[in-house]
Amino acid sequence: MPYGFSEPSTAAPTRVPAPASRTPHGTTPTPPRLRARTTAALRHAWPALAAYTAVRALGLLVFTVWAHRDHRGVRHLLMESWDCDWYLRIAQSGYADELGTRIDGNNLAFFPLYPLLVRAGDALVPWLPRGAAGLSVSVAASLLAAWGIFAVGDRLYGRGTGVVLAVLWGSLPVALVQWMGYTESLFTALCAWSLYAVLSGRWLWAGSLAALAGLTRPTGVAVAAAVSLTALLALRGPPAAARSRRPLRPLLGALVAPLGWLAYVGWVGLRLGRWDGYFAVQKLWRNEWDGGVATYRRMRDLFVTERPALFVAMVTVVLLGAVVLFVLSVGDRQPLPLLLFSGLLLVIVLGSSGVYFPRARFLLPGFPLLLPVAVALARARAHVRVTVVIAAALTSAVCGGHMLLGWHGPP
């Protein structure tokens, strides 16, 4: 396979001037060889990246036209609204140093990697308008995410499935968030490439990327657990040559994976002077894990006693659909790290007692759930595949516009 994380090719090595480019198996490639492999990987992935960009450009176009008709500011909505503003203020002024008692008011609930990147972007290009650096990070990360998602699908089922998988991820109902000043694109990129690294046996890459994901969102614990558990199980596998060659790599990957999440949760505890500081902050955001009781009651009320808003109904459909897709994924016997990640993500999102309406957004990183659909579409006739993809892209564009313009709340 042509990806940077895949096993080195057995073909003739690229000719370079210096003998130092001939690196031993498993060592870091020299820049010329790395550039050649990256270029080959991009050539292989370009249909997925082009199709993903086209889908998201359609969504942005529909949203822009809609916003202008409603006399709403496109730049403000994409760069500065809702959680975007929280991250921008963290990047500018840092974190709170006390717990306080204000509901939904403590910025320690937001993980630090994305605002650090925003701060770095603002320092490099200080003349850009507020929020432009954050949006740039998100758009760039969305392309890396689409590439990683394609790589996973391609490795497991072939290039066609990889392309469809990336397009489906860009066609989700709340996919407009991928091109907003939110963390979902960055988090998905780190998760996708971490899982790809697990599938290709690159344990240190997998653990390091999972650690960065753990610095990006609270659900980073899901990818960290998936990497660590898979790595530990790999240590118990048959003592083949591949395992005996570097027996410590899976162990190191397992140890590194949760460090990002643990580091931030521990730092919040030290900052607030209590071991459960981060969880106390989450309580102020009314976000605790109750095993799904609150989610069940909310869904029951929506169907029985209420007439739900369109956006809330859409969120409910996404949540129920995700459960069905997970069952299908288990039936398809997806690789263990993908099932662990998807399953843990679902448990965290559905088991929370927190606010209901952002949960479709919280599931955006769960791209392995889309694999059963992507495989089926890749095997379908071309006209069926094109029809479904176009319908999904148009539906996503309309839902994205409604999410920011019709729904009077955060995405």
Image (cartoon, rainbow, N blue to C red):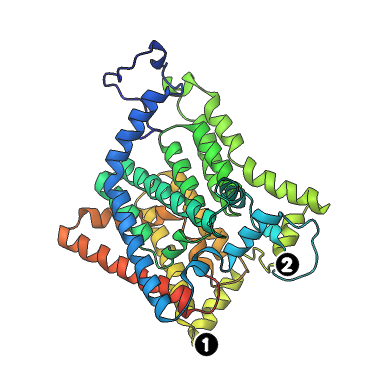
Amino acid on which disc 1 is placed: Glu
Amino acid on which disc 2 is placed: Leu
Vertical comparison of 149 with 249: above or below: below
Residue at screen point 64% across, 66% down: 290
Residue at screen point 79% across, 68% down: 101
First in sequence: mark 1 vs mark 2: 2
Q: Is 133 on the left or on the right of 88, as rendered?
A: left
Q: Position of residue 50 (x, y in %)?
A: 29, 51
Residue at screen point 32% across, 37% down: 41
Asked which quadrant contains residue 253, the reply is top right
> Which type of secondary structure does the marked residue at label 2 adopt?
helix
Q: Position of residue 116 (x, y in %)?
A: 62, 48
Check disc 1 and report the residue beneath it: 306
Check disc 2 and report the residue beneath it: 284
Residue at screen point 67% across, 55% down: 92
Residue 134 shows in the view: yes
Q: Is 78 on the left or on the right of 382, as rendered?
A: right
